[in-house]
Amino acid sequence: MKISKLLNTNKLLIHTHFVNGLKTNSKKVKANDIFYAISGSNFDGNDYIIDAIKKGAKTIISEKDFLEAYKYPDINFIRVEDVRKVLAIHAKIFYKDLSKSFTLIGITGTNGKTTVSTLVYKYFQYLNKKATLIGTNGIYIMNSFYETKNTTPDILELYEILLESRKNGVNTIIMEVSSHAVKMLRIYGLEFDIALITSLTQDHLDFHTTMEDYKYTKGLFLNSLNEDKIVIINKDMEDYKFFSYLSKAKTYTFGRKTSNYELLDYKLSVEGSNFLVR
């Protein structure tokens, strides 16, 4: 893909080039890549711009001016307001809107994400349906396992997982969606078909600083699904009405209160849970 097609313009370019790949890690840069200089809590991608250029990057995208740009007349330096958002937009184009090839199920919530996503994945296995699981315990593509650092990987890793899933004939992706992932735009541009929220309790305030921000971030994920998609909400949550209001999609509920799927005769023991669903 040409850089002009990816950016949808020639105006920002000193030099046009074929785009080999998109990278945020300078160590992984290859010839004709675009390097996105992302600032994180423990690192600043801008410190690795020269390294990326030496590895072969032809375009650098950052939120900051690169003061040594004059030394590299053959490199495109593009400044943007939000490099994470630009990366997600470019990735969607570069990978040809790959998420539309799957039924994409996202599961969020303070507690229960891993349990619910694993149960859904196991159910697909029980039905002999090909599925991929992405979450806290790693990545499972069919019977292959891959480790991951984050509950929800970054956007480029997610697209690589989708590519590998497609090669293996997978039709369904089950993904744990953390509030960090929503806030840091790791899933921006992915088109989810189903979103489920399990719970909301006080957590991650070191990252979100307030419960309102934490709640709103969870709500942004549900709000991202269009009218023809499905949102499933735990009606027993204190903030059920807030999430229900934000949902544009067809909304279903579950819980011990009167819901679309109501839990009856719920019994919890050391051996597990027993209940009826009406």
Image (tube, rainbow, N blue to C red):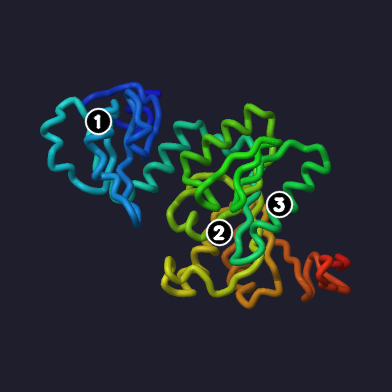
The quadrant of the picture occupied by the C terminus is: bottom right
Of the pair 100 and 245, the residue shown nearer to us: 100
Specify the label residue 118 is tagged with: 3
In the image, what residue type sits under mark 3?
Thr
In the image, what residue type sits under mark 1?
Ile
The residue lying furthest to the left in this view is 70
The quadrant of the picture occupied by the N terminus is: top left
**Would you say 205 lies left or right of 54 here?**
right
Q: Badges 3 and 2: C-beta atoms under 8 Å apart?
A: no
In space, the residues marked 3 and 2 are separated at their CA atoms by: 24 Å
Q: Mark 2 sits on what residue?
A: 223
In space, the residues marked 2 and 1 are separated at their CA atoms by: 39 Å
Q: What secondary structure is found at the residue carrying circle 2?
A: helix
**Would you say 43 lies left or right of 266 here?**
left
Q: What secondary structure is found at the residue carrying circle 1?
A: helix
The spot of residue 141 in percent (x, y) is: 65, 37
In the image, what residue type sits under mark 2?
Asn
Which residue is found at the position 78% from the left and 74% from the top? 256
Q: Mark 1 sits on what residue?
A: 53
The spot of residue 62 in percent (x, y) is: 27, 44
The residue lying furthest to the front in this view is 270
**Would you say 33 lies left or right of 255 here?**
left
Which of the 4 image quarters holds residue 69?
Answer: top left
**Would you say 32 lies left or right of 175 here?**
left
The spot of residue 20 in percent (x, y) is: 39, 24
The spot of residue 124 in percent (x, y) is: 77, 44
Of the pair 271 and 108, the residue shown nearer to us: 271
Of the pair 77 and 209, the residue shown nearer to us: 209
